[in-house]
Each structure stands twice: as C-alpha cells, then as structure tokens.
Image (cartoon, rainbow, N blue to C red):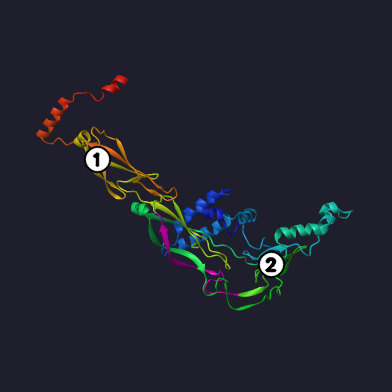
Amino acid sequence: MKPKHEYYDTLGLKRGASEDEVRKAYRRLARKHHPDLNPGDKAAEDRFKEVQEAYDVLSDAKKRQMYDQFGFYSESGFPGAGGPQGPGAGFGFGGFDFSDIFTNANPGRGPRPEDFGQEGGSKFSDIFSQFFGGNRRTQREPEKGADLEYTLSIDFWRSMKGTQVKLNIARQEQCAACRGSGQSGGGNILCPGCNGSGTVSQQAGAMRFNLSCPRCEGTGRLRNVCHNCHGDGRVTSQEAVDVRIPAGVHSGDRLRVAGKGNAGTLGAPSGDLYITLRVEPHPFFEREGDDIKIQIPVTVWEAALGTKIEVPTIDGRALLKIPQGTQNGQRFRLRERGVNNARKDKRGDQIIEVVVQAPKAQDERTREILRELAQLHDEDPRAEMWAKI
C-alpha cells in the first residue's frame, strides 16, 4: 500500500538520506515556499505546510523509524484494518487463540511449548500486542514547536557596525480561543462508539482485532473541537521580531532567536528562529577573515618620489606614507583598522595594495618629459628575468 504521505518525495530525497541531507532539503524548500516570500499564494502556503510536516517526521529518529517501517507515522501506533488512517488507529490480538494455527497445521499432536515460548500461545499474543500497540489509548502528548529558518541580506556597513532589524515572520502561535488545548468550551462527553473504553472490536475471518476507536481517537471521550484552530491548538499569524545583529558578522553566520519558532502543542515550548545572514559586497572594501583589503591608485611620481596620502578605512580617513620608490602591487598594513572580533577581543588590520597608474601622454609636452625620463633611466627592467631564463 502506498503511504498517505510521501515525506521523502515531499523533500525531494531518497530513502536512506542522511540527517544532514534532510536538514538541507528542508531549509531549501522552506525558503522557496515560505508565505512571506510568496504573499497571497495559497499553493505555496500549502506546499510550505507539507514540507514542514515532512521535516517534523524525518528529522525525528523515532518518528522516522516508524515511517520507514510502516509507511506512515502515528502517535498511537499501527493503523488497523478498517480503522482510521490518521492518529489513533492501533490494533491488538485479544480474543484470538494462536495455538489453533499450529494445531491445525500439525494434526495428531498438540502445540508444544517451543512453538510459542515457555508460556505458550498467550506469550505469542503478548508479543504482537506489545509490538502493535495493543489496547493502549491514544493520548496527545506535548511536543516542542518546530524551528524556523530565514535568510536576511544586509549591506557591508551594517555587517561592520552592527544593527537592529525588525522582521515580519509567519509562525504558528498558541490559539488564544482555546489556549492551545484544541478544544472549545463545554467540556467533553463519554464516547458512544466505545462506551469510554477507547477501543472497538472488529472481526476479520477467524481473527478478532481490538482497534482504537475512530470516533474518539482512542481517548474514550469526545471533545468539542475549537473552531478557531480546528483542534490543532495553534494558528498561523504574522509577528514582528526584533533581531540584533552584532558588529563583525560574516556571510553565512546564523543568529538564533530563542522561542520565536513555531509554538509547541499542549503547552510545550516553542521552537527557535534561525536567521542566516548574507552580506552584500562593497565596491572597494574586501573582507578577508578579520582583515580589510583595498586597492589604492597612486601616480608614477608619487610612487617614485614618495608622499603621504589619505586612504579610506571602515572608521573614516587615515594617513598613509608612501615611501620613495614604491612598486606597483606593494602592500602596506594599517594596524587594528580591520574588523572587530568580539570572540577574540581583538581587531584585524587593513591591507592596502598600491596600484601605480601611468600618466596619459595626450600632449607633446608630456611625451617629451617622458622621453627625457627614459634617457635618464635607460636600464632594462626585464634584464634580470632574461638572465635567469
């Protein structure tokens, strides 16, 4: 039978995918179909819920083990024949004597203890009942809310100085109408389908099964479902969240805002909000670890004669001495003018690379001066290279 929910297909994965593959697939699809990025798109919202449901099951080892083995996940165990397809459908083997199978299969002798273990047929039935959930009632248990993932782009200067931003996120919060219980007022009544036992019996040939009651989901009581949240105890809403971005963050850094993920069920704690940062590049400054790199153009005569020039830094302007005879590509270091690293309690440097720019010989006077300069310095700058070749 094909599973009701193809969770691996939902995430675009094959069975046996690693935890890391499940997590990466979830993040990619959650960002793609998130309601904030697809406003007014009902299909994207439904797809986002499917991705969230698939991740909730496949990211939990116990839930995933059950799904891999039976093709579904249910809090109550194995769904019985003719029972509901959702939660609350388990079955046991009460009322059926397994020793009849072995007696009929071996005429002329009764069942032996080794056929069933030292306690005979009752032991065999107990194993099956324990494996498939037996007469256990289905009770909703508190479950922590799922974490949420967002991507935030910030410019270079915000990453250097730090900032605070306000994000509007879509998250599941506790239903105010029922306070997260999923039930409306008026209490609940005894289930007429099972008379409060939580189980009903069904006959299939020679076998009688004890199934979780489909009307009350094995609880023995009928509850009045909250019309606001439809029994889930949570509703989706938009919330403005203030996020503090510290100075010196990198692209790819993740920030955690505790308790701002989806609300938990039945009073369980909420998940967390994780924000992955993407720092936009700057036209001149380039970050390398905690250092800042920049290329500064200088003229031929500034490089040859030496001078002092002003250079930009992330703190403003700074004075740099260009020594006489500076070569193209030569680097200079301004100590502690880079990124402040709060973890190491130290600051990086600014690395300045000199780019010597040749003058544009657009008039005869300039060309004449350059020819005179060439006559004064007739050495071949490539002589050393040819000698080594």
Q: Which residue lies furthest to the bottom in this view?
A: 186
In the picture, measured across the screen, residue 371 lies left or right of residue 249, that is left
Q: Which x, y percent locates residue 2?
A: 61, 56
Residue position marked by numbered label 1 in the rendering = 297
- Please name whichever residue, 67 or 379, is drawn nearer the observer in this view of the structure: 379
Q: Which of marks 1 and 2 is in front?
A: 1
Q: Is residue 350 above or below residue 385?
A: below
- Please name whichever residue, 374 or 185, is drawn nearer the observer in this view of the structure: 374
Q: In which quarter of the image is the N terminus?
A: bottom right
Q: Which x, y percent locates residue 150?
A: 45, 57
- The magenta span reads 224-246
Q: Is mark 2 on a helix, strand or loop?
A: loop
When asked about the image quadrant of residue 137, the answer is: bottom right
Q: In this view, does 137 lie above or below 363?
A: below
Q: Residue at x 82, y 58 (%)?
A: 121
Q: In which quarter of the image is the C terminus?
A: top left
Residue position marked by numbered label 2 in the rendering = 137
